[in-house]
Amino acid sequence: HVATVDVVSERASLDGCFNVSSEEEWWVGDYDAVVPCSSSGLLTEDFRLDAGAVVGATNLPFATDAAQDAAEARITFIPEGVSSAGAVIVDSIEHYSRDHFVDADPELLYEFTRETIRAKTFELLESAKEANVPPSKIVSDIAEPRTTDPIGRRFQAWAKFKSEENEAMRVADKHKADEIMARTMVAAAAEARASIIGRYASKAMKFHAQTPARPSPRRVAVDASALPGRVASPRRSTLSPGRAVLNANGRRSFASAAGASHWRSAQTLASAGTSAHTADAVVVGAGIMGLNIAYQLRRRDPHAKIVVLEQAPALGFGSSGYSTGFQRAYYSFDETMSFALDGMAAYKNWKDYLRDTDAEAKFTETGALWMLGYNQASNAAMVDRLARFGVGSDVVDADGLRGMFGGLISSEPMPEYNEAGDEVEQNLGAFSAVYEHGCGHLDSSTCLTDLLRACVRDGIDVRFNQKVGGVELAACGERSAGVRMADGSVISSGVVVNASGPWFNKLNATAGVDLSTTALPTRIQVGHKWIPDEFCKLPFVADGWGPSGIYFMPRAANNQLVFGSVDHRFESEIVDPDDYNTALDPDVKQDYLTCLFHRLPTLPRDGEIVGFSSMYTVNQDDVHPMIGETKVGGLWACNGFSGHGFKLAPAVGSLVAQQITGVRVGAWDTAVAHDFMGPYREPLTLKVKTHFA
């Protein structure tokens, strides 16, 4: 029951509403909502509203702050800045998508506006409830940052999908129409700068996709949890048989390998009736992460149908193909150190891990020199930590460095200069570093080829040139039911793993998924040059001694020195994964070389410098990945590795496979806690923000 009121009574006569303009005490009616359509300052302290909510449709419906405060003590007020934003939204479309504005049917503009305002209203109510304050007090908290794409730019993608679905909606029944509407909003989120519009899409999607609709309680606007599509209770209280479950002490208990098939036989394949394509698990992305996850799932359940979807025509087009393949144990957290050692064990025993005597990738041991600016005491503490994990290492001073590498590596700190070009004193103390034994590298492309061969051998269906358009949701809107391809076809599955690297956010947004930390595709630049034989015996070196911020490592097989960044100043350019510069910038190359020639003073200056740019997906909050099931049931997040994903990948495959199936198989399984890198964890605290974590 919605009441409308206007100083010109006939203007408040709207379909489906009660025009109470002519009633003497219209404010005492027991309405779900009152919409004052005109006249700012209409509501004073004398108006004791009995309605459930006031929805602002004028500039300022309340005469004074005191009148608003008195009303909000009893009712819900939706400020006009949210509820009456239609003109601003349409103006934005006209400005940023002018051609589409001119060609669009007016009703389509209205519908986009309604959906956007509805979604933003849901977000406002939910945020207010969580903060336990009136909605009007939290409007600024839900405002998008200035870096966000204008709302007008989102109309084109929304209209595109809307037009494609219109015919289906005309002939479909109500249940199907609701589902189509949900998919339309989800698809718009993917197309229209997915990481931005995703927040809106998730709310609108839930509203439309909840089928059958729950009866709306009286005064629905008072409690955001009672809105259609909103579930007040936890998402689910039970898990499928064979899945990992929480026992009384809060720890996960695991099924045996004999019960592995339960995870798939109990899945709800909500879209199976609309598509001939089904799978027990769909992994999006055939990089080192996606292939390891598929491989580890299949190890636990040899009869499971695992499908891996890769948008590129072949292996190695994403971050994995450009990885240096370096392996090390030096990490800030014990859990990450353990995780890395689990991965390194697989790489050092690659043929055993893949059960393939023909696997070609080989581990090349180089050691690693960590010159990160820490003093002798801090480095000694790291040596002790590494020893507890069975890793040999040494503290190295300037004399030790000279003795180990014959003076090829200088122990002098990189000089620092002020704006005038004068060198400034740094007071860094005596040189100290850690040398870690057992580090090394593999060729990333060869690893991918070996891993693909093992997956195909084991019956995993790996498909290339397969672009995923979005996550397919079940009718309830709270569980994945597979993926919708870019061509509109659907692959139904109760388990979807998002291992799509830099495209991770775009896919998540189609399901309305936001995580507690933010990972963004970040441009990373790498160079390499020819080196004489004596430099091929150097270790991997991370140089943070003074304002340097580079790493370098030899590739003895072809006399190349590979060098890149370990400093945040080189790792801050956020890019569109589908459109970024893949060359090495001249200024960055010069910066790299200045640091490199300082650290290696006898390195020949001649010879061509070759370079490229690729991407890390960097967690902006703590440079650690987000791994685990999202709030959309059956949708797994696996991303944000910030440059150390390749080395962790075999352990990540084990972790995700354990989470999905609840099964450990012993060999090559990690024991790292499942929630340490969970998608909704609090950010981990780091002393220094670099991708070395």
Image (cartoon, rainbow, N blue to C red):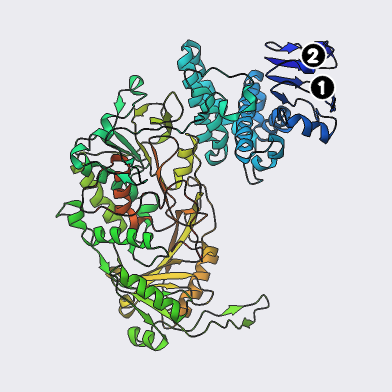
* 348 in relation to 122, above or below: below
Q: Is residue 22 left or right of residue 429?
A: right
Q: Nearer the viewer, residue 69 or 310?
A: 69
* 159 in relation to 658, above or below: above
Q: Which residue type does callout 1 highlight?
A: Ser
Q: Nearer the viewer, residue 624 or 369?
A: 624
The residue singled out by tag 1 in the image is: 38
Q: Residue furthest front?
A: 248
Residues tagged 1 and 2 counted as in contact (Cβ below 8 A): yes
Q: Residue furthest left?
A: 357
Name the residue rendered at 49%, 23% in the picture: 209
Cα separation, mark 1 vs mark 2, equals 9 Å
Near mark 1 (Cα within 10 A), the count class, few <14, some 14-19 or many ≥20, is many
Name the residue rendered at 41%, 28% in the picture: 487
Q: Position of residue 271 (x, y in %)?
A: 37, 23
Quadrant in the picture for residue 480: top left
How many numbered callouts? 2
Q: Position of residue 277 (x, y in %)?
A: 30, 26
* 175 in relation to 226, above or below: above
What secondary structure is found at the residue carrying circle 2? helix
Q: Is residue 23 left or right of residue 382?
A: right
User: Where is the N terminus found, in terms of image quarters?
Assistant: top right
Q: Which residue type does callout 2 highlight?
A: Arg
Quadrant in the picture for residue 537: bottom left
Quadrant in the picture for residue 34: top right
Identify the disc placed on residue 11. Answer: 2
